[in-house]
Image (cartoon, rainbow, N blue to C red):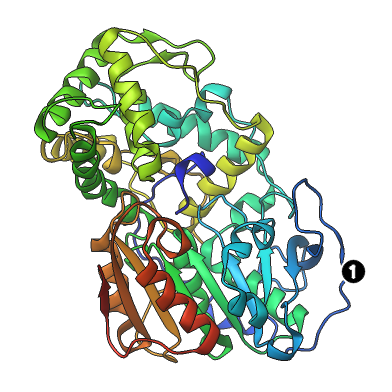
């Protein structure tokens, strides 16, 4: 997963294993098996503020890998060449979070944060996943109200009812069935990994290295499972639980513990003497105040012109809290919101992405999580789960176990989630912050266990989503940079305090 502020369509999913409509081995074999470079037409990338060295191109890939000679779609990708050709090792793929995010521009920004010895060694490769951005795009044409954060992340009614969530799921699913075309059925994590292998072959690379972030860690390990002999050095940053049955549903459930853990960090900050945005005298008082305000806003929302919806209700307040816990730099904004709500006022409404972009992000996100796994469809089952969650984790009020669009998705997944195993080359370095609201340490440990001897894990004693060159620390950054530049990896799991 990516930062919520950069990806307004983070959704959840639940899963049950299906029989393969097409065996994974068949689909994998249909991908490019060689590394003969294609004739790529590199052009100047669209957009502003890009590094002048970055160039973009596209390739065609099968819409359906079970029908490799059938209809084709395009996948867009970009490259900044290694800065020292004599030291060049290969290509480093920047695999974005999401689902519903792209990295086409990341060689020019995120990639330039890499130390020079890494930039010397690798071509930096960004891409837009199938359905997204400058690849063949998809949209569901959803109602504007259904693009609200509190619809995309399914907050239940103040009394815990999921009736409206189920209606929203039906409405969003019908929109995707009506407007999404054939492509909406073929957007999945496994197909994104297969597309990456087509990019690898087109570049003429026998193996690739990668820096996968959040949801990108899941894409990375799926690639690692499908194409183990085509991996070089893989960095997994802010790691998803690879649960082979629940898949994305497990990630959403992780918000329960992630919010509790990270709110405690915020509350400690927000109660410090001398803090200009101090909320209360103790961390416990900060928590009580937040919960009281959320309950009050459930009963009496405040008008919020320009927002979607145009009111600050309890669930919008909770969602703003969740968003702010991704990065300690956003703590002051959350504190100011709490202080304003306490006075019965609101800050300026946050600027929303352009609606066409939000429609695109939402469609790709929904398609990925719904096509990856089968969702429960029983409203009674969701009611039961939401009630249990609300009782144990009041900060998230039942949202992480509630019904998303997938509860009414009209299509059946074409294959089950890829099971992540400990079989394959030992090419993975994981890095994980101890306090992470979206991908908490508990989920990262599940991935670490699944990979076994294939991985080593660096746990960073820091707070925030995104560890390497972001919210981590110097020890973690050095460890990852050394691995990418030289291949040196700790012999065993370590903690960076």
- Residue 161 in picture, x, y percent from top left: 25, 25
Q: Is residue 314 left or right of residue 131?
A: left
Badge 1 density bin: few <14, some 14–19, many ≥20, Cα 10 Å: few
* Residue 415 visible in the picture: no
- Residue 472 in picture, x, y percent from top left: 37, 61
Q: Is residue 255 left or right of residue 228?
A: left
- Residue 387 in picture, x, y percent from top left: 16, 34
- State the residue position of label 1: 41
Q: Quadrant of the C terminus?
A: bottom left
Residue name at image x 20 percent, y 21 percent? 159
Residue 174, by quadrant, is top right
- Of 350 and 446, nearer the camera is 350
- Residue 104 in picture, x, y percent from top left: 69, 58
- Of 183 and 452, nearer the camera is 452
* Residue 104 visible in the picture: yes
Q: Quadrant of the N terminus?
A: bottom left
Residue name at image x 22 percent, y 13 percent? 296
- Of 126 and 191, nearer the camera is 126
Judged from this view, the residue extending furthest toward the front is 274
| Secondary structure found at label 1 | loop
Query: Count the marks: how many?
Result: 1
The answer to whether residue 231 is above or below residue 133 is below
């Amino acid at each position: 997963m990516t930062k919520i502020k950069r990806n307004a369509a983070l959704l959840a999913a639940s899963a049950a294993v299906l029989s393969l409509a097409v065996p994974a081995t068949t689909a994998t074999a249909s991908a490019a098996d060689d590394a003969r470079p294609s004739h790529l037409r590199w052009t100047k990338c669209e957009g502003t503020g890009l590094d002048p060295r970055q160039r973009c191109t596209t390739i065609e890939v099968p819409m359906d890998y079970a029908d490799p000679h059938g209809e084709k779609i395009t996948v867009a990708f970009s490259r900044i060449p290694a800065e020292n050709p004599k030291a060049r090792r290969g290509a480093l793929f920047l695999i974005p979070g999401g689902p519903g995010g792209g990295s086409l521009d990341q060689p020019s920004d995120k990639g330039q944060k890499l130390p020079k010895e890494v930039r010397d060694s690798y071509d930096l490769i960004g891409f837009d996943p199938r359905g997204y951005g400058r690849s063949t795009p998809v949209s569901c044409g959803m109602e504007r109200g259904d693009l609200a954060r509190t619809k995309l992340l399914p907050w239940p009614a103040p009394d815990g009812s999921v009736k409206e969530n189920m209606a929203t799921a039906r409405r969003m699913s019908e929109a995707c069935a009506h407007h999404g075309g054939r492509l909406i059925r073929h957007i999945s994590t496994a197909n994104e990994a297969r597309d990456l292998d087509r990019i690898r072959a087109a570049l003429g690379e026998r193996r690739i290295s990668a820096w996968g972030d959040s949801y990108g860690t899941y894409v990375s390990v799926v690639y690692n499972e499908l194409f183990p002999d085509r991996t070089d050095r893989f960095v997994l940053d802010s790691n998803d639980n690879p649960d082979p049955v629940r898949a994305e549903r497990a990630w959403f459930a992780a918000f329960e513990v992630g919010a509790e853990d990270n709110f405690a960090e915020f509350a400690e900050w927000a109660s410090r003497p001398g803090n200009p945005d101090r909320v209360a005298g103790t961390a416990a008082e900060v928590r009580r105040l937040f919960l009281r305000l959320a309950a009050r806003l459930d009963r009496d929302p405040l008008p919020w012109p320009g927002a979607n919806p145009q009111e600050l209700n309890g669930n919008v307040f909770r969602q703003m809290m969740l968003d702010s816990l991704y990065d300690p730099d956003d703590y002051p904004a959350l504190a100011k919101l709490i202080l304003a709500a306490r006075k019965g006022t609101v800050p300026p409404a946050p600027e929303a992405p352009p609606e066409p972009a939000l429609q695109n992000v939402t469609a790709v996100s929904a398609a990925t999580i719904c096509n990856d796994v089968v969702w429960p469809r029983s409203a009674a089952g969701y009611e039961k789960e939401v009630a249990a969650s609300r009782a144990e984790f009041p900060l998230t009020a039942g949202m992480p176990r509630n019904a998303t669009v997938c509860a009414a998705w009209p299509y059946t997944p074409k294959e089950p989630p890829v099971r992540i195993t400990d079989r394959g080359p030992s090419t993975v370095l994981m890095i994980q912050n101890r306090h992470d609201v979206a991908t908490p340490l508990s989920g990262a440990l599940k991935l670490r266990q699944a990979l076994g001897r294939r991985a080593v894990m660096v746990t960073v004693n820091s707070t925030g989503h995104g560890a390497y060159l972001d919210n981590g620390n110097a020890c973690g950054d050095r460890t990852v940079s050394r691995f990418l530049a030289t291949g040196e990896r700790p012999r065993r799991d370590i903690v960076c305090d």
